[in-house]
Image (cartoon, rainbow, N blue to C red):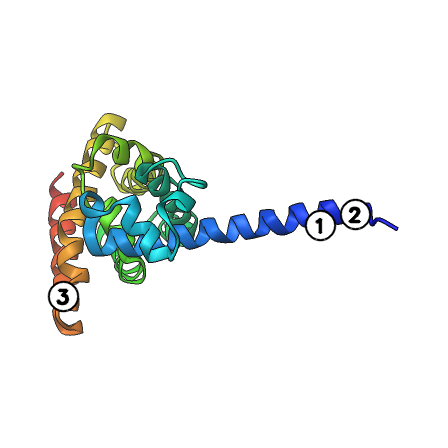
Amino acid sequence: MTDPAAPIRTRRKRQARGEERMREIVRAAAVVFAERGPDGATTNAIAAEAGISPGSLYQFFSSKADIARVLSEHYAAELSGVRQTIMDVGKEASIEASIDAVVGPLVEFNLAHPGFKALFARSDLPADMREAVAPVQQAMHQTVATLIARFMTEREPADVDRIATVAIQIVRGMMPLITEAPDPATRDALTAELRTALAGYLTRA
């Protein structure tokens, strides 16, 4: 007797295999973006890292930018804890305490996710890549702007937005130096310099 549920189970298995293959491709993309950067990364290189053919990759993703979009969504989910830590900073916290609450977790996140730096440390990404990661960048910008607004209560929203943009650019500029430091002592020293640079800017902005 034919099992009427067999086709359903088969579809579910195929769906599960497809989802796992997509995760493998995204993990491979993180490695390739970290090693080659957004410009040097190619779908062929990502497919090779994932152990599949380029044709198999294109069954799931239409382009490198499409992969970057899914990868950035993955990073957004991973960053939710960092954003919550930032937003948990007390409203009466000083600028220095707020900076400490932001910088430490961000450094740790970048160290744990090398591909993140490749996608978010640059402001001059190709247009298609920039569009792919824009929603996550905007979410991070809003988080930083909200934190800055807490201790710049008399500033206009446009001012806060501009200050957040500059603060994020300072972090972007320093983060590659920090994550690529040759030893922990140098990394700690560079992280301290980042805190100093942010405090100097934000106290004068």
> To which residue does mark 2 refer?
5
The residue wearing badge 1 is 9
Image height check: is 154 above or below 172?
above
Residue lying farthest to the front in this orientation: 1
Viewer can see residue 29? no
- Give the side of residue 153 with respect to residue 185, left or right: right
> In the image, what residue occupies the spot 23% across and 30% down?
127
Residue beneath the point at 15% across and 46% down: 170
Q: Which residue is mark 3?
A: 181
At mark 1, the secondary structure is: helix
Q: Is residue 124 left or right of residue 11?
A: left
Q: Position of residue 105 (x, y in %)?
A: 31, 59
Query: Percent position (x, y) of residue 40?
Result: 18, 47
Task: Spot the residue most to the right.
Answer: 1
Dot 2 crowding, Cα within 10 Å, few <14, some 14–19, many 20+: few
Graded by Cα atoms within 10 Å as few (under 14), some (14 to 19) or many (20 or more), the crowding at tag 3 reads some
